[in-house]
Amino acid sequence: MNIDNVLIVGVIAGLIQLIGYLVYYQKSIKGSVEPNALTWLMFAYGTMILFVLELDQGASLSELILPAVCSACGVGVAVRIWVIAYRKEGKIWPRTWRMERSWEGRSFAADLILTVAYLAAWVLALSSWLSDSERLMASLVFLFLANATTFTAFLPVLKQAWQAPTTEHWLPWSIWTMSYCLLIWVTASDSEVIFPANWDVREWTYDFWSWIALMIYPVSNAALHGLVAVFACPRRQREMVMRTN
């Protein structure tokens, strides 16, 4: 695949991601969405760390544009949530960011544990006192655990959108879904992976496992963003309004 074409699509994916954030930010200012505080906190530190680690892993510019936009804008949304909470509560650490004995609190705890685990795996992957095969295994563990935090971060907003669809809006989440679908194509096109001859996982090469781990990021994000869009679609919002009236 022509590298210029891949870069162009990567830039388009990043621009679409930015458009989604501009739409979301506008709707949050107008009060038509209520951003889930815990999810956006996890998005903020999770995407920022993941971007730095992907950069360290040698990800291409085409693959990094969208995560860079997502990281910067996600931090922006989290900061706005913090400012609003601080003005309301007068506390440095808002109540909505506390690790309480609730479903959302457990998701936050699990996300922190996974984040610490994949950072530890990353350190092991860089260490010189492990063998080459052990470092390769640590790299794979790091990649898979890094992607696992996507699911824990999404749990609070998925629950919120399902139970109260009027607190979210389908449009920005649909836009983000589109951008991640483009990133799927970019990641697949940017990788020179050799597919295994059979489905015996014991014979799969490290490069193929690494490719799977890299693909999980855009695929999982496309699916999860799309799910929020479905949960907050106009039909479900109308049904919620009718039930409350």
Image (cartoon, helix red, strand yellow):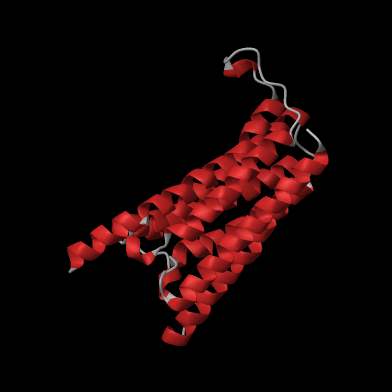
- Image coordinates of residue 227 in percent, x first then y, are 42, 48
Of 205 and 163, the residue lying toward us: 163
Q: Residue at x 43, y 65 (%)?
A: 36
Image quadrant assignment for residue 186: top right
Residue 88 image point, x, y percent: 42, 85
Q: How many badges with numbers are in the image?
A: 0
Q: Residue at x 45, y 68 (%)?
A: 37
**Does 175 sit left or right of 101 as displayed?**
right
**Is 92 in front, or is 241?**
241
**Residue 59 visible from this viewpoint:** no
Task: Indicate the quadrant where residue 196 lies.
Answer: top right
What residue lies at 48% left-to-right and 77% top-to-bottom? 29
Q: Quadrant of residue 131?
A: top right
Q: Residue at x 17, y 69 (%)?
A: 245
In this rendering, would 34 be left or right of 215? left
Is residue 178 in view from this perspective?
A: yes
**Residue 119 against residue 185 in the figure, above or below:** below
Residue 170 at x, y percent in the picture: 43, 57
Above or below for 21 versus 147: below
Q: Residue 159, percent across and down?
A: 35, 55
Q: Is residue 226 above or below residue 157?
A: above
Q: Could you tell whether 31 is left or right of 51 in the image?
A: left
Quick one: quadrant of the N terminus?
top right
Classify 138 as above or below 43.
above
